[in-house]
Image: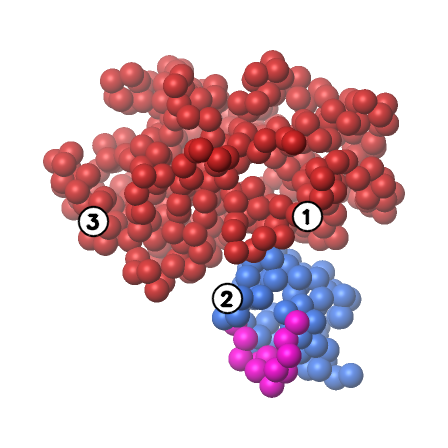
Amino acid sequence: MSNLEKYSQAFIDAFEIEDTGTVSKLEYNSIDEWDSIGHMGLIAELEDAFDIAMETDDIIEFSSFEKGKELMAKYGVTV
Amino acid sequence: MSSANSLLSTPPYGLNKRDKAALYRLALSRLTQKHYQNCTEYRDIVDGLGFDPTVKAPAEALPFLPVRLFKDFSLKSVPDKDILKTMTSSGTTGQQVSKIYLDKTTASLQTKVLSKIVANLIGPKRLPMLVIDSRATIKNRSHFSARGAGIIGFSMFGRDVTFALDANMALDINAVENFCAKHKGQDVFIFGFTSIIYQHFITPLQESGKRLSLDKATLLHGGGWKKLEDIAVDNAHYKRLLEDVAAIDKVHNYYGMVEQTGSIFPECEFGHLHASIFSDVIIRDTALKTAPHGTKGLVQLVSLLPESYPGHSLLSEDMGVILGEDDCQCGRAGKYFQIFGRAKQAEVRGCSDTYVAK
């Protein structure tokens, strides 16, 4: 699986998304599932998938699918 | 841009009295004007007091709202479409709850400020985390109590988050012992509410005679002492008990309220509650005049965070005393103080006090 696929899959699993075509448009609070609880679930999925430990500031900055891609680069993950 | 936002890169206890006063004159004046222009109820109060909102007054001279107004009125300074979530104090049946309306800016500020304050205690790295509560508390996402919001807010500073209590609020000793074994020798973070920790962690451990070895843990707890005062457990006693049952020697209480989420006041290594650069404390005497340091009185809380509701200057129902300013032995600048609990005849409230054990 490519990094982009792994990255997308984390969102799909964390938020139980059925229409997988919409995943790249996701933003924090844009769907009910991505609230503060869902957010920590997503971070856990990403940390597992890429075997990384994110810093609190980056978890706070992680506001959308696109923004998250930039942040992943800090951990050596190119999405 | 909010003043709190521009302070995020300043160390959270890095402003002395003079610098803080100068900054607060401007920042609070901006908030007062914003809420005056956007919240009818607030405008009526300010006008009623004869206060000119355009004056850059010191924090002590600003109007302050009694916290209970948030129970009786829907106070907000943003259009309904901008409200992201509503926080409520977790009142039990028969008590009215406070409703605090958060927009994106305020919610985000709360998270960022809390992270700066917590990092000052446990360091910038996320630590393995034990929550002394039940996962069930955060299950109902449509109804967030202050307790649930607190747990989620603090979970951001943890990893491998483990809940110590099961769905019936019984201590899950297996889960806790597994956590201890897994993170043996590592720094860990423990979070919970004061009375819940006492009732559902300390007490069952005492009864079972088991002693945990969480000697590398930092425990942060808040939510009010009312229930423990009733059974005469004070802060010093509480710390001794945690050391006895779990070998936890870094225990920090924090003071704060749902009306000013984020800008909490944690206790330092010397047992003093501290105001960070994001908030301040003023003590008022029975005539509601500013009381000098060392004099006990009603606690007024000032915060730079509330952008979506007029909560930047509030009169609490708690009694407290300012112990000093800029000169605590711990080295943190700002005021440090002590809280004595609710003023007589105040309603019982506080996110862990209102939890009633079955």
* Quadrant in which residue A54 is drawn: bottom right
Magenta part of the protein: which range? A16-27
| Residue B231: percent from left, percent from top | 61, 15
Q: What residue type is labelled 1?
A: Arg
User: Is label 1 or label 2 in front?
Assistant: 1
Residue B315 drawn above or below residue A51: above
Asked if badges 2 and 3 are on one and the same chain, I answer: no
Chain coloured blue in this rendering: A
| Residue A33: percent from left, percent from top | 58, 66
Question: Of A54 and B18, which appears nearest the observer?
Answer: A54
The label shown at residue B135 is: 1
Task: Verify whether residue B330 appears in magenta.
Answer: no
- Mark 3 packing: few (<14 Cα in 10 Å), some, or many (20+)? some
**Cα–Cα span, label 1 and label 3:** 39 Å
Return the residue at label 2: A29
Q: Residue at x 44, y 56 (%)?
A: B85
Res. B119 in view: no
- Give chain B's shade: red
Q: Which amino acid does label 3 sit on?
A: Thr
The label shown at residue B40 is: 3
| Residue A29: percent from left, percent from top | 50, 66
Q: What residue type is labelled 2?
A: Asn
Chain assignment, label 3: B
Q: Residue at x 57, y 66 (%)?
A: A34
Q: Which residue is drawn at 67% across and 68% down?
A: A14
Question: Of B199 and B225, which appears nearest the observer?
Answer: B199
**Cα–Cα span, label 2 and label 3:** 28 Å
The reply to whether the C-beta atoms of the residues labelled 2 and 3 are less than 8 Å apart is no
Q: In which quarter of the image is the N terminus of chain B?
A: bottom left
Residue B105 drawn above or below residue B17: below
